Image (cartoon, coloured by chain):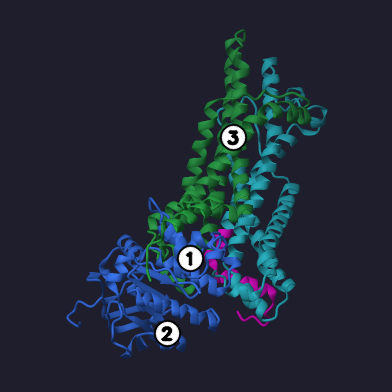
Amino acid sequence: MSRPPSAAETSSLKVRRGKGRKARFSPVDYILKDLWRNRSRTIMSMSSVAALSFLFVLFSSMDAGFADFFSGDTGVPSDEQKELYKVKGVMENWVYLITALSLILMALVVSNTGIITVVERRFELATLRALGISMPRVIFMVSASLAMILYGGVLMGTVLGLLCIPLLDRVSLTLFTQGIGFPLSFDPTLIWRSFLVGTLAGAIGASLPLIFIARSSPLEVLRDG
Amino acid sequence: MDNGTSFISVRSVVKEYRVGDSTVRALDGMDMEIDEGDMVALMGPSGAGKTTLLNMIGGLDSPDRGSVIVKGMEISSLNEGQRALFRKNNVGFIFQFFNLIPSLTALENVLVPVMFDRDPPFDRAVELLERVGLSGRMDHVPGRLSGGERQRVAIARALINDPMIVLADEPTGNIDSVTAREIVSLFRELNDEGKTMIMATHDRLVSARARSVIKMRDGHVVRGKAKSRERIVHLADRKASGGIRRKVEG
Amino acid sequence: MERRTFNAASYSLSHLRRDGTRTATTIVTISITVAFLLLTSSLLFGMLTDGGGDRKAGLLAGDIPGSVDMFTEFRLDQEISGRARNSLMSYLLLTSAMVLMVGFFIMYNTMAISVMERRREIGILRALGLSTKEVMKLFLLEGAMVGFISWIFALFFGTPLILNLASYLINRGSESIFFVMPSMPLALVIGSLLVTMALSTISTYIATIRPVGSSPVAMMRTRI
């Protein structure tokens, strides 16, 4: 009756696997499939994060552009230089304001997406726990999928921002201000700064849904729905 | 075998739930012993505590008082992490509503409990699905499977870790009677291989083919009757074959 | 207080009251979003309107008499501060548009959460004989209520913050260079109400259309 699978059978399995079935199935596959299933939401969350990242990049390069504009200026009297630094201070204030704004909104986007995940997939998460996957691992999976959305968005926004800076420099200024404004300039530290803002926002935003998971009992979810 | 070393023993277990302002006593001093290789049907009206008992044995729930001992291990005293490990290695859960993951294919659903392992037993998942008769539908998502097929995927998933105990909560509650019959036959087959099956059910079809029937009411055993006591458990055979037997087709 | 009628509005109201925590979270979330919308647009308004009627003469702030009168000493500074204003203004327009987009998404998500939690309820209502349109009306009404309450919160708690804190933060340490005073004209107040109501209703509609359209039986038993 019972016998271990013969060599012919295992080889036939391998052949079938070769025709498109993956031989491995890991939590990463699981997360990617879930993001793909909810692709409209994934795209919306990602593009929201991207838009906020883009704003951060834009205002930071405006600040950098201002700094660049005057860095070569040597013939300015010291009194004027002082006043210029004050204008620079204003620009920095704007950068802080926009950073704070994108941080808070990004955190809201992340926590919203996280809460949707936790609410919509509560059966799924409870089932995973009933099947013997420990709570830290479930939390890991949810935070990994949130991190993918977040860093995907930050990457998109930063790259888009860096690509658009030369374009914006010409188009939007001429449209709105008859070509009089400050040149935007690229600042390499922007890249890690925008990822830092993203990380901070993610940490703030993800905490609520993750606490939700940690405190939920799989039993109650499976029983009451 | 009543020397305190039964395979599963439930001792004076009390469990209460808060529902709104009142407390409901789901289990009220439950005492029960289940032998290894038994196939038990838990019968009783809704609210008799069948599901609660299954969850206790499966380590999903812990009792307020009393103890649940499985394989000499007191699971009521394990912490959450240890219980997750216990569930993963010893228990296979089959739910009434299947609880499959909608975005994953049948094959991937079977692999979910072991996805964090370094080397998930891919071939075993394929074999299990072939065994439950789903060889042609491994790449289908649950939305494209019928109720019976979903339940078979759930059964394959419960078996992926080769558990000693399979717990099924109303396994035939959401499928037609022809499919239900096939699924009960499959349970019987698994039981013949030495798995201890415990099923909470209303279905006469299921209880008729169980080895023992335990009737519950209001959180305790009303009547526990062993239908057949001969053990046709081929433990040695089961171990030799690694717990897997292929269904002979045709 | 005894209610004699029971209609769609009382249904929505009693739901909002009973499910207080969720309602509060939704309102707080949407209020923050609306407050940010108010912030960016009031700054834009402030920049556009200060300087009086001569605004149209030219956007270069240095050219406008009275608006930046502290710049009489250095011609260069006038030009620079004018350029800074212009840059800020054009990018603020972009910012407002993006905050609007993100705000819409946040609202949609928030509405989607509350609809998702009530799928079972939608199924029951449909099973009891309410038409798709009626269920939809119920949810749209509720979305509009939430939008309105959030707007009130944003206006009454957000405006003082915007007018004081934001303008302080922006103009910190630079009063003598140029000064951006956020302004909140009536047009902005009314406009923000319209935008908030439109966004919350549209997002509720999008979030509800699929659950309401699908089979009530499936809705009452959503586990796969």
Spot the residue most to the top: A75
At label 2, which amino acid type do we have?
Gly
Q: Quadrant of residue C78?
A: top right
Chain hosting mark 1 = B
Chain B, chosen colour in render: blue
Decide: marks 1, 2 in contact (CB < 8 A)?
no
Q: Is residue B18 visible?
A: no
Decide: marks 2, 3 in contact (CB < 8 A)?
no
Which residue is denoted by mark 2 in the rendering? B47
**Residue C107 within the segment the image draws in magenta:** no
Dot in front, 1 or 2: 1
Q: Which residues are magenta?
A: C1-26
Dot in front, 1 or 3: 1
Q: Which residue corresponds to the image point at 63% horizontal and 71% vertical from the top-left? A: C13
At label 1, which amino acid type do we have?
Leu
In this rendering, is residue C84 above or below B35? above
Gap in Å between the C-alphas at discs 1 and 2?
A: 34 Å
Residue at mark 2 shares a chain with residue at mark 3:
no
| Residue C157 percent coordinates (x, y) | 59, 52
| Residue B102 percent coordinates (x, y) | 55, 63
| Chain cyan in the figure, letter | C
Which of the labelled discs sits on residue A158, or is there none?
3
**Residue C12 within the segment the image draws in magenta:** yes
Which residue is denoted by mark 1 in the rendering? B129
| Chain green in the figure, letter | A
Q: Secondary structure at mark 1?
A: helix
